[in-house]
Amino acid sequence: MPRRPRLHVPGGVYHVVLRGNHRQPIFHQDSDRDLLEDLLVDSLHRDGCEVLSYCWMSNHIHLAIRVGDSPLGRFVQHFASRYARTVQRRVPTTGHLFERRHRAYLVTRDSYLMALIRYVHLNPVRAGLVADPADYLWSSHRAYLGQARTPWLNVAFGLSLFGTGQAHAGRAYQHFMAAAPNPDEDSKVRAGLEETDAPDGEKVPASAPRTVMNGDRSLQLEMLIAAVAERLGVSVQELATASRARHLSYARTVIAHEALGARLATLSEMATRFNRTPATLWRGMQRHVHKTKLCADGIAIK
C-alpha cells in the first residue's frame, strides 16, 4: 500500500532529519560534507527553499528549512539521492545509504523554532564531540555568532526571533544558547519527530493548532505577523511582551487590523496572541482606522 503524501504548507518551516541506514556513518571524510553542501545548494536554488539552521553529524543530519511552492520531499530526495549515489560509488556498501525516508516536523510557533535552533546546534555537545558548539565546524552555530559566513544560510531569519538589529539579536542568541534548555525542551523536539514517523505518512503534530490541518489558518496568521513585524522594524517576540512602547502598540494594532480583515483570527484570539485585553486592542484599532482615514483625506497626523 503506497504511503500517503506528506503535509505540504508553502512557506512553512520544517525540522528535517535524515539518518544513515542502521545508524551507519553517512560521512567518511570531510570532503563528503563539502559534497553534501554543494548538492544541497543546488537543490535550494532548484526548489526555492531556505536553510535556517543545520548540523551535519557523522551518521545523520538536521535541517531547519523553509520551503517554497515545491513539496519538501522533492527537495530532500533531489540532494540526498545524488549524494548517496556519489558516495556509494567510492565506498563499498550494500543496501541504502540513508534510513528509509526522512523525518519532517512542521514548525508552527516561534518559541518552538527557537528551541529547535538550539537543539540542532547543541547536537555535537550532546554527542560528546565538543564542549562548546562553536568548536564544531559542521553546523550553522558559528554563522549565527558571526564567526563564519555561509552564503546559502538564512541567518537573518533565525536571529530575528531574538530581537531587532543584528548586534542586539546576536547577543540575545548567545545568551539563549548559554542558558540551559528547559527540562522538557529536547524531549518535545524529539517527540515531534517521532510523531511524524507513523507508517501511513506524516501527521500534523498534536501540539500544532487544528487550523493548520484545516487550511493552515494559524500558519498564515504567523506569517502575517512576521511579515508586518519585519515591515515595521519590530521583533515578533516583542509583540507579546508587556511593553506599551508606542511602536509596539502601533504594530500590534496594524497586525490585528490586517488579521481580522483577512479573517485569520478573531479579536479575542489576537488579544491572547499579544497578551492584551480585547478592549485595549479594539481601542488601538479604532485609533488606527481613524488616523488612516484622516491621512487618506490629506490631514497630517502627528
Image (cartoon, helix red, strand yellow):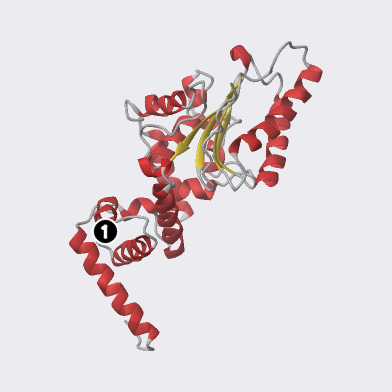
Residue at 32%, 25% (x, y): give it. Answer: 183
Residue 15, how many percent across, how many down? 51, 34
Residue at 54%, 34% (x, y): give it. Answer: 6
Q: Amino acid at mark 1?
A: Leu
Residue at 42%, 40% (x, y): give it. Answer: 213
Q: How many marks?
A: 1
Is residue 50 something one can see in this rendering?
yes
Residue placed farthest to the right in the image? 89
Q: Could you tell me which secondary element the residue under label 1 belongs to? A: helix
**Location of residue 199 with respect to 236 vertically, above or below:** above
The local crowd at label 1, few if under 14, some if 14 to 19, many if 20 or more residues have their Cα within 10 Å, is some
Residue placed farthest to the bottom in the image? 298
**Location of residue 37 with respect to 258 vertically, above or below:** above
**Location of residue 260 with respect to 72 vertically, above or below:** below
Mark 1 lies on residue: 267
The quarter in which the C terminus is drawn is bottom left
In depth, the one of 152 and 193 nearer the eye is 193
Residue 269, how many percent across, how many down? 27, 52
Residue at 39%, 61% (x, y): give it. Answer: 262
In depth, the one of 284 and 261 nearer the eye is 261
